[in-house]
Image: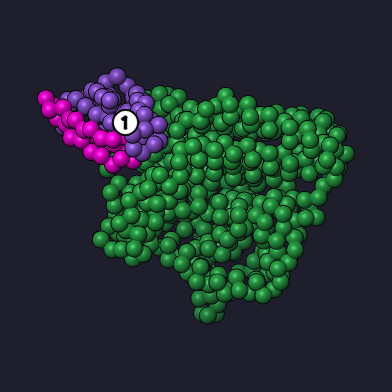
Chain colours: A purple, B green
Amino acid sequence: MGTTIEVEVAGGKPVDGVQRYRIDARDSVTIIVVGDTADELHIHGYDLVVGFAPGQPGSITFEANIPGIFEVETHHHGDLVMELQVG
Amino acid sequence: MLNTVLAHGVGSRGDLPLPFYLFGIGAAVALMATFVSLSFFWHRAWLPAAATGRSLGMAFGRVLDVVAVPARLASLALFVLALASSVSGAEVGSQRFGPLTVYVALWVGMAMVAAVFGDVWRVLNPFETIAGAIEWTAGKLGLPQLEDTDEIPGGYWPAVVALGWFLFFELCYHDGTANSAVGGAMIAYTVGMVGGSAVYGRRWLRQADAFGVLFSLLAKMAPIHRDDTGAVRLRPPLSGLATVAPRIDLLAVLLVVLGGTTFDSLAGSTLWRDLVGTHRGWTATGINTLGMVIVIAVMAALYYLGSLAVGWFTNQTATVVARRFAHSLVPIVLGYTVAHYFSLLVLDGGQNFLRLLSNPFDRGSNWFGTADWAVNFFLVSTDAIAWVQFSAIVIGHIAAVLVAHDRAVETSDASEATWAQRPMLLVMVFYSVVGLWLLQKA
């Protein structure tokens, strides 16, 4: 069980463009983020933050228990990285 | 500083997409069924007569006048608090009290209050209070008093400009939810409102305050109103719309809000997100502004084409028709507001507003005991939200068709009126289907 999402960020922006990931409500989600600068990923709604740096991928696992669409952004650059659609 | 690109300026969650095909077909069928059945059983205009309503007596009005005083002061206090919080730059978590007050409590909350309880904003409007206080002080100092004129030049166009500016700020400007931006905008708006009142008298607020003009239109839907004597009267919901002045500038107010809300829906979709791509800052602001202007223009053009076609059947100019049926857009404006912002109001937006009300300066205060609230995202289910969205759009359009039919049968018989109104029905079906389609693209 559980969904793993891997995202690569360059200069605060997602390398493959902004994608929307669908997750079933109450499923377990792991987000792994690889980046070329030190930054933090902010998951709106869930208000979770995960840090990452060059050579140090960030990883966070949580239960997707809030239904809706949530934006995930880089904290310092303030760029949209992806969207989570829960439910 | 978070440079958020969220659809509604504030708020952290978006609604799930609606299953469009089912809902879209349902909406179109419901609208057409209403339209056809009206020609059979609605033969004469009765909203104008019903709009006066039944008086609840003077006593009730006097009680309201007493309650109005603390309410007015509380509203002024909230305004000052929101402004002070913005100026101080306070942020609790990633939430800011000033933007929440303006975008959630005022823009969404008051709009819904107006549609249900009437023109409450007229009492709560802090600019009325400030202007009144200045007038009173000037009187005490023996300064000459301004005579309140019936109408200032420019009609409601100042409100159209103010609305456009507000919507640009909320939906297009890339930094529109920053404390500094909202604080600055509040100060600028206050100067415009109070300064205008100093020149033109209090009448300025009736014609230039974006919120005042819009909320007074929404209040015409309310089943409760006050007459010139101050008596509180009950009337059938929607009937007050028959008393809306048939004016192009009021039509512009409604079309700008309708277009703005529709653009907000579009801006929250993956379609628009892909279009804006990686553009940020002023480039994003430019793209969004262009998008909003185009959406407003398209909504207005469709309405104009509908009017042109109806006028062709009834031997009237498009302008005359457009004015005559402008009031029928009010329920649609409310429907769209509910559809797009209901979840924001009851979930993160509204709850964060109440939470930060206790601690607007992030100094650990807990004035009303709400500071420790965590946002409860389960207050309403996503299914319930979906049904509210669908119902709001469909009921809004059905109400519009009904109100328009009532106006049409003033001058022609029911079947003739129905026949002539067909182009407008098409516009309504198009609006509602596009509205639902955008919710599906959320």
Please identify the quarter of the rendering in which residue B44 is found: top right
In this rendered view, identify the residue nearer to me: B386 or B144: B386
Please identify the quarter of the rendering in which residue B317 is found: top right
- Residue at far top of view: A16
Residue at 64 percent across and 40 percent down: it is B395
Instruction: Name the spot of residue B269 as percent of width and height, x first.
Output: 45, 29
Magenta span of residues: A40-64
Residue at 28 percent across and 49 percent down: it is B93
Question: How many marks overall?
Answer: 1
Residue at 69 percent across and 42 percent down: it is B399
- Residue at far front of view: A1
Instruction: Name the spot of residue B79 as percent of width and height, x first.
Output: 43, 61
**Is A11 situated left or right of B431 in this image?**
left
Residue highlighted by disc 1: A27
- Residue at far left of view: A55
Residue at 40 percent across and 44 percent down: it is B378
Q: Secondary structure at mark 1?
A: loop
Few, some or many residues within 10 Å of mark 1 (<14, 14–19, 20+): some
- Residue A63 magenta-highlighted: yes
Instruction: Name the spot of residue B192 as percent of width and height, x first.
Output: 50, 56
Residue B111 appears in the picture as rendered: yes
The prevailing secondary structure element of the residues shown in magenta is: strand
